[in-house]
Amino acid sequence: MLIRALIAPFLLASLVAAPALAAPPPVAGEILPGWQEPDGARMVAVRLSLAQGWKTYWRSPGDAGIPPDFDWSGSQNVKSVRLHWPTPSIFRTNGMRTIGYHDELILPVEVVPQDPARPIRLNAELDMGVCRDVCIPATVDLRADLSGQGAPDARIQTALAHRPATAREARLANLTCTVTPIDDGLAITARMTLPAQGGTELVVIEPANPAIWVSETRTTRQGSTLTATADMVGPTNAPFALDRSSLTVSVLGDGHSVETRGCPSN
């Protein structure tokens, strides 16, 4: 919680300085219309183009990042939306580690319509953070009318190919999580057997509840064993019950990543 308190003034100062850098806009967005899957779902993508030197953030951006927030409520004939995040990059910003994308992000989006026989109208608002020397908030409006079968798009297919590997594909085994109470929440340690993913590996642990803050993990490797420890602080600033089955554990390496759901006790 102290880390968060120290970061807040830094972000506020960045936001105050932002208007001088706001022209031209550092990010533009559009929806790539994609194609209809055999089951009736539509595979589209959000394409974000970033100005030179700017970056934006992954769903779990790190302590100094601003997480993206999609609002699809203005859409029509949409039952559900699932984002397929490609493997992100790891950055260092003013000594802080952040996770995200630079230049361009093609984010595949699987849209399940209420009625596959009817057109889909996507009307979404994306609130996000973009950063260069400072971080500023940005809002991107995304609209598209989708009908017919569409056509395969190599950009979307490439982004899907850069998805994280599953535990089985990556030969991840023996994953366990040890949870211990601390004054304002929980300390969690994840251990797993996993071949090296290249470069400086980072383990990210995400709870299903977005109100739970998770610190940057301390990640170490000894042979085939990867260990990561983080602190979790909930809204009550006290120890709380954690559903391990809802945890998402990701390992980010040099161009490779692994993602799995659930982390049982040892």
Image: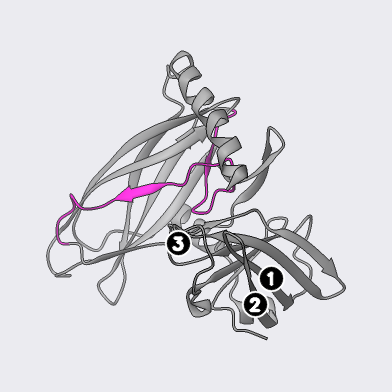
Q: Residues within 10 Å of mark 1 (few under 14, many from 20)?
A: some
Residue drawn where x is 50% and y is 70% of the image = 240
Query: Mark 3: which amino acid?
Result: His
For disc 1, the marked residue is 189
- Do the residues under discs 2 and 3 have CB atoms within 8 angstroms? no
Which amino acid type corresponds to the residue marked 2 in the rendered image?
Cys
Q: Main secondary structure of the magenta part?
A: loop
Rendered view: 223 above or below 7: below
How many angstroms separate mark 2 from mark 1 (CA)? 5 Å
The residue that appears at 47% across and 25% down in the rendered structure is 15
Magenta highlight range: 53-77
| Percent position of residue 5, x then y | 56, 39
Left or right of 151? Residue 213 is right
Which mark, by number, is residue 177? 2
- Would residue 71 be counted in the magenta stretch? yes
Provide the secondary structure element on which disc 1 rests.
Answer: strand
Q: In the rendering, at what x and y percent does residue 117 appear?
A: 13, 69
The image quadrant that residue 202 belongs to is bottom right
Residue at (67%, 80%) from the top-left corner?
Answer: 175
| Of callouts 1 and 3, the N-terminal one | 3
Which of disc 3 and disc 2 is earlier in sequence? Answer: 3
Q: CA gap, disc 1 to disc 3?
A: 26 Å
